[in-house]
Amino acid sequence: MKTFIKVFIVSFLCFFVAASFGVVAFLKENDMSISENIGFGYAGKQEFSRVLVNKLEKEPKAEEVFESLEEAVQNSNRVNFLLLGMEDIRTDTILLVSFNEESKIADLVSIPRDTYVHRKGYNAGDQRKINAVYGNHGVDGVMQTVSYILDGIPIHHYAMIDYDGVIEIIDLFGGVEVDVPFDMKYWDDTDDPPLNIDLKKGRQVLDGKNALDFMRWRKNNDRKGYIDGDLGRIKAQQQVLGSLSRKMSDNLLTVVTRGYHYLDTDMGIIDLIKYGKGAIGMNKDNITFHTLPGEADYRTIDKRLYSYYVYNQKGIKDMLEDIYNVK
């Protein structure tokens, strides 16, 4: 099995799955060769992208209002994608993207890797974290677990992007502007890939490698890290997302020609055409970030103390009712 990026950029997947695949499909449907259209320079690529957008873009419709979450899940046009970033056989990053192609609205729910789940027969402390599910049950098991946590909403598809693809895409767009909250300095030659993070505090533009380091960072070698633990890292990922997404909508052809082969997904070409055409015209104002409602907690299992993120079911229902437009 391929080794995937430890922490991966949800913005690329959100836009790539939804928007750029539609452009690929459009080219195929019209018997147009991508290779024949990438030789006319950067300005030409942008103009070509704008022509495609004009052909495919449709006006968004108002999102339907529902009386209950059960009704919304059954009748909503939303499609839910599970995005995973891997650390060997553990899911280091878990993100749900809920996308309504008619209203062009997307909601992104970050799920902390330490979220507490107790599976029958898996009683060890480290087995009670959601990041351990993949090693025993694969992608299907993670999809079922996330659906269970999120009140049974369906998970329709999954997607992954590899390590090289993340760096490549960020560099394609000239880096991402972020605000590094404090000096980040950490090295570990035993990590895979090896970590050598050295970022200074302040607002700055990070290239692909340093942006990846920014998202992977947990703590310095002196063990000073985010006050709110993994939630701080989730905020860093979302900051990269916001910065990158602002650069992508006018450069669909660049994303397609350079990013297509980095994606690993269960979606077929019919799915890609459908979702891609529906997402053309999205912008940053159509995307809302959420973090799974809950709080950090410690539990003793077999005389050993473990840190978990314990989700709040009432808070989750409230969040889902907001996402699904339940009034």
Image (cartoon, grey):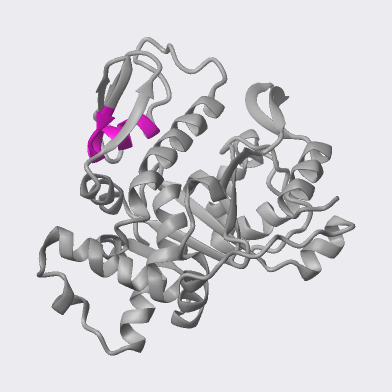
Residue 170: image location, x then y, percent: 27, 45
Foreground residue, 166 or 192? Answer: 166
Q: Is residue 61 magenta?
A: no
| Residue ID at (36%, 16%) | 220
**Residue placed farthest to the right in the image?**
67
- Please, what is the dominant secondary structure of the magenta stretch? helix
| Residue ID at (66%, 52%) | 146
- Whether residue 282 is visible here, answered yes or no, is yes
| Residue ID at (52%, 77%) | 274
Q: Quadrant of the N terminus?
A: bottom left
Magenta stretch, residue numbers:
205-215
| Residue ID at (42%, 13%) | 223
Query: Compared to 18, does 185 lie above or below?
Result: above
Q: Is residue 264 left or right of residue 111?
A: left
Q: Is residue 211 magenta?
A: yes
Foreground residue, 151 or 40? Answer: 40
Residue 32: image location, x then y, percent: 25, 85
Query: Compared to 310, does 141 lie above or below?
Result: below
**Number of callouts in the render?**
0
Foreground residue, 309 or 106? Answer: 106
Residue 264: image location, x then y, percent: 39, 65
Which of the 4 image quadrants contains residue 249?
Answer: bottom left
Q: Is residue 74 left or right of residue 39?
A: right
